[in-house]
Amino acid sequence: MRKTSAALAVAGALALVITTSQSAAADGHGKGWYGVWADGVNVRDINEGNCIHAPSTSNCPTVLGQINSWDEVLVYCQIPGQSVGGNPYWLMVQPRGWTKYGIISSYYVENSTNWIDGVPGLNGCVI
């Protein structure tokens, strides 16, 4: 019984370490890794047309790929654009495991507010 309890305690502590290290910035402070809460989220090409200045589905029509609820994205900056689900911000991101970066609606990123404190705006959109 004691061995089982000790093993469960170690496993629980390990799970806590793994979980917290994956989304270091999930508290909404600064550039870093954030979780995505939805499936089939389009990562759009930020380098076309007026996408960087006015992100929207029509200004950023090219979809580079999709990410899902178990994925994480490295957030670089945030830009006001088309409101999605009441959230008017879009994020320049690089999904974990991708070599390219793109833009997604901030609505799909796990954060308690629309604006992510400490993440720069348009002028900070530099990798």
Image (cartoon, rainbow, N blue to C red):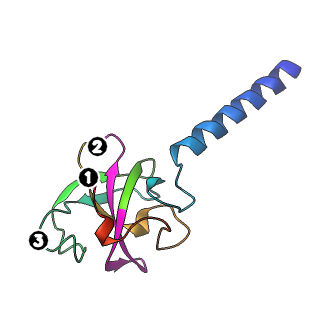
Q: Name the residue at 48% across, 60% down.
A: 30
Residue 123 falls left or right of residue 117: left
Is residue 1 something one can see in this rendering?
Answer: no
> x%, y% of residue 23?
52, 49
Separation of residues labelled 2 and 3 (CA atoms): 23 Å
Where is mark 3, residue-wise?
49
Where is mark 2, residue-wise?
98
Where is mark 1, residue-wise?
101
- Look at the numbered disc 1 and give the secondary structure of its residue: loop
In terms of secondary structure, what is the magenta stretch mainly? Answer: strand
Residue furthest out toward the left: 49
Q: Amino acid at mark 3?
A: Gly
Q: Amino acid at mark 1?
A: Tyr
- Look at the numbered disc 3 and give the secondary structure of its residue: loop
Residue 10 falls left or right of residue 41: right
Reading the chain from its start, which is encountered first: label 1 or label 3? 3
Separation of residues labelled 2 and 1 (CA atoms): 7 Å
Residue furthest out toward the top: 3
Is 96 colored magenta in this rendering? yes
Total numbered labels: 3
> x%, y% of residue 94?
32, 51
Res 90 → quadrant: bottom left
Separation of residues labelled 1 and 3 (CA atoms): 16 Å
Query: What stretch of residues is rendered in magenta?
Result: 77-97
Mark 2 and 1 residues: CB-CB less than 8 Å, in contact?
yes
* Quarter in which the N terminus is drawn: top right
Q: Amino acid at mark 2?
A: Trp
Res 96 → quadrant: top left
Is residue 31 something one can see in this rendering?
Answer: yes
Mark 1 and 3 residues: CB-CB less than 8 Å, in contact?
no
Res 61 → quadrant: bottom left
